[in-house]
Image (spheres, helix red, strand yellow):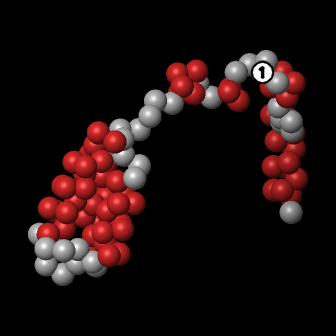
């Protein structure tokens, strides 16, 4: 069975993010999966292929995860060393609540 051009383009777009050794396997599996759908459109094809593409896709390693987020490192910037802005103590919170209660 021949697939419509827009659906064949969708298969190739989803396969483009895969490594070369998995590309052909995904395209073959996608065309086999889509052959079993009687009334096919771009939306139904996409829904059928997303989970299939996820099985073939292996995300590249992210070295930032091992180091942790940079904004939490103490002393990494001048702002990280300073105390937080607008920090309130218990007395100012109590005064504000008391003023609000008098209204």
Q: How many marks?
A: 1
Quadrant of the image occupied by residue 58: top left
Percent position (x, y) of residue 25? 22, 48
Percent position (x, y) of residue 11? 31, 62
Image position of 24 (left or right of 91) = left
| Foreground residue among 70 and 11 | 11
| Foreground residue among 11 and 37 | 11
Q: At x 44% / y 34%, what residue is drawn?
A: 60
Q: At x 58% / y 21%, what residue is drawn?
A: 67
| Residue lying furthest bottom | 39
Image position of 76 (left or right of 85) = left
**Is residue 80 visible from the viewing direction of this image?**
yes
| Foreground residue among 39 and 78 | 39
Image position of 37 (left or right of 85) = left
Mark 1 secondary-structure assignment: loop
Quadrant for the N terminus, please: bottom left
Image position of 4 (left or right of 62) = left
Percent position (x, y) of residue 32? 14, 61
Mark 1 sits on what residue? Answer: 76
Q: Residues within 10 Å of mark 1 (few under 14, many from 20)?
A: few
Quadrant of the image occupied by residue 64: top right
Percent position (x, y) of residue 30? 22, 59
Quadrant of the image occupied by residue 76: top right
In this view, 9 is above or below 55? below
Q: At x 13% / y 78%, what residue is drawn?
A: 38
In this view, 53 is above or below 57? below
Q: At x 28% / y 43%, what residue is drawn?
A: 22
**Is residue 83 visible from the viewing direction of this image?**
no
Quadrant for the C terminus, please: bottom right
């Amino acid at each position: 069975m021949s697939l419509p051009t827009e659906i064949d383009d969708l298969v190739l777009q989803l396969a483009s993010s895969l490594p070369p050794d998995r590309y052909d396997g995904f395209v073959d599996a996608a065309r086999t999966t889509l052959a079993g759908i009687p009334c096919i459109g771009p939306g139904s094809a996409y829904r059928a292929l997303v989970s299939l593409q996820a099985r073939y896709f292996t995300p590249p390693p992210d070295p930032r995860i091992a180091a942790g987020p940079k904004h939490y490192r103490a002393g990494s910037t001048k702002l990280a060393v300073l105390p937080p802005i607008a920090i309130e103590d218990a007395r100012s919170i109590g005064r504000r609540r008391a003023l609000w209660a008098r209204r």
